[in-house]
Amino acid sequence: MSSTTPQFRWVMIMLSAAALVSVTFGVRQVFGLFLVPISTALDGGVQIFSLAIAVQNLIWGLSSPFFGAAADRFGAWRVAAFGVMIYAAGLLSMAFVVTESGIFFGQILIGMGLGSAGISIAVGAAARAAPPEKRSLAMGLVTSFGSFGQFALVPVAQIMMNEHGWQFAIVILSAIVASMVAVTLGMRVPAGGARPLEGITQSAGSALRQATGSRDYILLTIGFFVCGLQLVFITTHLPTYLQDAGLSAEIASWSLALIGLFNIIGAFMCGWLGGIVSKKKTLAIVYLLRGLIIAGFISLPASPAMALFFGAAMGLLWLGTIPLTSGLIIAFFGPRHLSMLYGLVFLSHQIGSFAGAWLGGIWYDIFGNYEAMWWLNAAAGFFAFAVNWAIREPKPAAVPA
């Protein structure tokens, strides 16, 4: 490593983490496009693949604290390199074993891959590497840049499906994920180059006991359940909802793509705001605005313009919760065990994701529409606003002269 590395190494780690998230999270966002073709191939209702996606999200959440603790101890790049390989294997299982067991096994592997090479590992690596005064911005940038994958990969996946079929599209996505092994090398911390972490040295067990006994950490965890409920319901079921309303598959894919594009702006702004104003108030307002936008969307007639507007508006609020939630965890407990503690909060997010994906599929198969599920998501946004507003945010420590 050159002598300039220690000062600017955090930038390289941040950019590598962003590239990793761009692909691992971006590929995750395309599964809603595969809901109908895979359900047709399985000769069943949409609830089968919906349940598989729900299980993926649950495995993602259950594995995140363990992979986070491993990343805190052994290095994020090692855990992430392992993660992208099992992620790629999961995609190949979906493409070549077109049975219920093959689809479920593939989604389980993908869930483990997201737990070990997803947003919690990437954000944790960037937060530990960045200087304290740039930490909130770094987390926002990882989340923001990472959103480009959703914008780029959703329409590309739709084009590949149209031209060559859904199995070919998944094989190509698997190759893209596997290529991220090279990117994980950019997240390595050189010998002697690790940034000292402020605060008292604390064991992982002690940090876990402190967190689970904290009222504010528990409120944050409850609020993050709603984030998962909303995000995965929308990414899984929005394409089917729009096509049932008479809109084309291309409009549905561009609506999801716009979520990714506008999240680049939204996540950056939330990360920036988290460094200068109250994190908990900003987070609460994000949930409030989500509830209002969802309520407005389902109250107005469906149209191409409305679908694209919804994608753009939700994109501004999409992953901005991540730097704010991570920032609050650091404010509560410091950065040393961030990956593990964020992983535990993220488990709540993924339980919400499980509910959003599976309940949406069950409701649709029984009633043939998503109306009640949309209203549930809107109401959940108002609930999360109240929960996060009740958090007692620590005041920033005074900076010595």
Image (cartoon, rainbow, N blue to C red):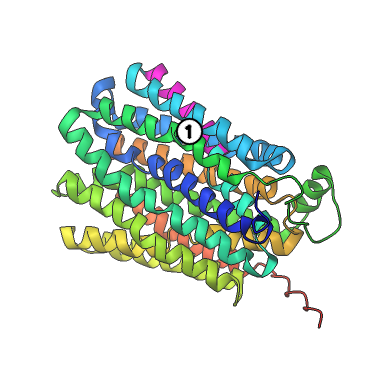
**Can you give x and y, in whole percent of width and height, for residue 171 in the image?**
33, 27
In-image side of 226 versus 258 (left or right):
right
* Residue 303, visible in the rendered structure: no
User: Would residue 316 be visible to someone looking at this image?
Assistant: yes
Q: Looking at the rendering, which quadrant does residue 329 occupy?
A: bottom right
Residue farthest toward the front in the current orientation of the protein: 2
Left/right placement of residue 205 relative to residue 351 reads right
Q: Position of residue 100 (x, y in %)?
A: 37, 19
Magenta span: predominant SS is helix
Point 38% across, 67% down: residue: 292
**Magenta residues, as a range?**
100-116
Residue at 36 percent of width and 41 percent of height: 360
Identity of the amino acid at label 1?
A: Gln
Position of 163 relative to 328 (above/below): above
Q: Is residue 167 above or below residue 10?
A: above
Q: Which residue is mark 1?
A: 56
